[in-house]
Amino acid sequence: MDIGALLKSFIYIISSSLLYPVLFFLSVLIVGIVIYSGSFFAEWLERLRLAKYPPEELPLMIRQKDNAKIFSHRVNAYIGGLRRSLNSESQPGEVEIENFLQENTLSIWKSLDRIKMIIRIGPSLGLMGTLIPMGTGLAALGQGDMTKLTSDLVIAFTTTVVGLAIGIVAYFFYTVKRRWAEEDIKNIELVTEILTDNIPEKVEDAIFQKEKEQYIGRSG
């Protein structure tokens, strides 16, 4: 038994069987990009309608709680969560606030992972969709089957175009979304700094009040 020929046949079968999964996943990515573009342009319109203020006026606007039309929905959701935490009976400490900030920051960065992967996966699938039909097409050429060769070449070139188009669109979306993410992270850090600048005073007042109540209880 020729082991080399057996291995070549095995690899050829595996390579040929990957063509339809590649075409399927390319189709899925096309649909995914179309759906993602809808949410992308919805967020773009939202940010286009936001009021523009000089950076030096933002702290005052945050303290006045008049920030619904200044920041994106993601930042407004963070502000609402932070205010609820600060106004709760259990006063959060520096560690809890830092953890809340880091969790939201991580969530913002994680939201970019999907589109970042598509930047690489799209062209890679397009390249696979090019090379696989080229192999079967060359095999058909050796047998004089020009019809199959033509069909395989059409599939090879169209998958290349589709894969590159997916990568280009995904890179555009990722570049803009990354800039938005950096802006949101900057804003939530600013909000956290402003809304928590008097936490030590609150903690000290609570401690003083507790000691005062204990002193009154002992005196009584």
Image (spheres, rainbow, N blue to C red):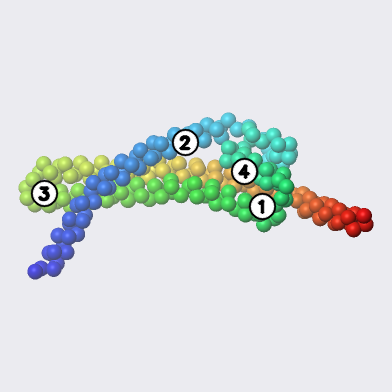
Q: Secondary structure at mark 1?
A: helix
Question: Is tag 3's residue or tag 2's residue first in the polypeptide sequence?
Answer: 2
- Residue 72 lies, in percent from the top left, at 59, 38
Question: Is tag 1's residue or tag 4's residue first in the polypeptide sequence?
Answer: 4
- Residue 39 lies, in percent from the top left, at 47, 36
**How far apart are the alpha carbons under marks 3 and 4?**
60 Å
| Left-right relation of 148 to 87 | left
Give the label, 3 or 2, closer to the camera.
Answer: 2
Residue holding disc 3: 140
Q: Quadrant of residue 47?
A: top right
Check disc 1 and give the amino acid type. Answer: Ile
Q: Is residue 100 visible?
A: yes
The residue under the point 23% across, 48% down is 19
Q: Secondary structure at mark 2?
A: helix
Residue holding disc 4: 78
Check disc 2 and give the amino acid type. Answer: Ser
Residue 49 sits above or below residue 131 on the image: above
- Residue 170 lies, in percent from the top left, at 41, 43
Instruction: Indicate which disc residue 97 carries.
Output: 1
Check disc 3 and give the amino acid type. Answer: Ala
Q: Secondary structure at mark 3?
A: helix
